[in-house]
Amino acid sequence: MSRRDSRVIWLLLAATFVVILNETIMTVAIPKLMDDLHVDALAAQWLSTAFMLTMAVVIPITGFLLQRFTTRAVFIAAMSLFSLGTLSAALAPGFLVLVAARVVQASGTAMMLPLLMTTLMTLVPPAKRGRTMGNVSIVISVAPAIGPTISGFILNYLAWRWIFLIVLPIALVMLLIGIRFVENVTETQKSRIDVLSVVLSAFGFGGLVYGLSVSGESSGSGSGPMLWISLGVGVVALTAFILRQLYLQRRDRALLDLRTFRSPIFTVAIVLMAISTAAMFGVIIVLPLYLQHVLHLDTLSTGLLLLPGGLVMGLAAPFVGRLYDRFGPRVLVVPGSILVSLVLWSLTMVTEHTPVGMVLAAHVVMSLGLALMFTPLFTAGLGAVPPHLYSHGSAIVGTVQQVGGAAGTALLVAVLTLQTNALLATGASLDAATASGVRVAFLAAAIISLFAVAGSFFLRKPADAPAEAAFAH
């Protein structure tokens, strides 16, 4: 690559890391926010729910945005929105303004990951994509993993507003550097946006993510009509959205072109990505609950215990990328999926007396397994898509991550709470009941992980696949 192309990619990597960090940075701040802003737990969860919901609604539209506007324009818009949202959150006088600020933040975040991946697939030659995509995996996997650690450290010494005040100058510097150095590296094409597709996408993906979030927030009771209404609207709207895209893509006007799924490699990679993301986000939520409510660690200790796993993912990703370039995805994804599954099965045996060191070791090994999976999945999946569909493939990857993360979180929290409440009703102690709930939650994740193990054997490197001539414009 030229110096210009390398500079653009590294700048996009740094900016994407900063914005994705915010997706999980609020998880351990909820109790302090509840006290300072005088809201209950259900309302406070909207700080995370609104972020995920906005991401799920905006990401599908980025496929169109990346084709219609230049790299420079999308970058400036994304970082401007993120910076504005961060400033508004830091100065928020009340809870509603803070939620609105998180929505603005998420709008910028949603644009960055598809922009990064589309730019990378356009600029990097196939033989070197694994190595470069390894750096993307650092952004996608490590940023959410260390978010709770960073916020736990900040909250141990400072007020919650400092979570945003520390991030703001970094975001502004990235924006100014981008204005100076980001150049247009992709070709644009004039196209009209299909308003009906945008509406159906918002109700479809938004309905699913909101329904799944409500499921988790309502402790999996499933009794609230809003849960079923949201999921029902999401399923119906998503079905209509898919039918609409199948019709529009005949004239190259689809908001999210589904011809990417004509590649078996892309389809397998997306399924495995959904399962892996669900496992990662589910563990990010459930493991801190176990550490704090059963083993009685404070927020800082919890964050520090989760930090080594995040560092392992970051350190392993570049090496995994090089191995992908040399050997292909299967030799990495198969052992990676097995490691993740084995760890999840081992976590089904935790108790209120499990040593903290064993939990730390399990999290590190699981992080290594996920590191072995993410880079090959991104690289092989998008590499199997023809260049004119890179932007749509990147948008689909981002959307699947959001829905998968919401689904994993909702499932594990719902199962955990149902089991905990059932045992509390029989007179069990809170520690024992919660530990049992955690075991059952990890059992659900372990069972799902078996599908990833089975699917990993079907993943191939795009270069080994038949010619992509089947993709018609």
Image: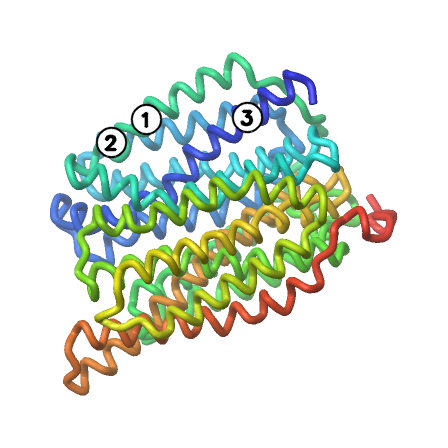
User: Do tag 1 and tag 2 residues touch (Cβ < 8 Å)?
Assistant: yes
Q: Amino acid at mark 3?
A: Trp
Is 394 placed above or below 161 here? below
Q: Residue at x 50, y 67 (%)?
A: 341
Residue 426 place in picture, x, y as percent? 18, 87
Marks 1 and 2, how far apart in space?
A: 9 Å
Between disc 2 and disc 3, the foreground one is: 3
Circle 2: element type? helix
Q: Identify the residue position indicated by label 2 in the image.
A: 90
Q: Identify the residue position indicated by label 1 in the image.
A: 168
Q: Identify the residue position indicated by label 3 in the image.
A: 10
Circle 1: element type? helix
Q: Amino acid at mark 1?
A: Leu
Q: Amino acid at mark 2?
A: Ala
User: Do tag 3 and tag 1 residues touch (Cβ < 8 Å)?
Assistant: no
Residue 180 place in picture, x, y as percent? 51, 12
Q: List the single residue furthest toward the bottom.
A: 426
> Looking at this view, is 463 or 120 the one in front?
463
Q: Quadrant of the C terminus?
A: top right
Residue 311 place in picture, x, y as percent? 41, 42
Q: Residue at x 40, y 19 (%)?
A: 173
Marks 3 and 1, how far apart in space?
A: 20 Å
Q: Quadrant of residue 107?
A: top left
Residue 45 place in picture, x, y as percent? 28, 54
Marks 2 and 3, how far apart in space?
A: 27 Å
Is 59 placed above or below 450 here? above
User: Do tag 2 and tag 3 residues touch (Cβ < 8 Å)?
Assistant: no
Between disc 3 and disc 1, the foreground one is: 3
> Looking at this view, is 294 or 263 the one in front?
294
Q: Quadrant of residue 312?
A: top left
Of the image marks 2 and 3, the number of the one nearer the N terminus: 3
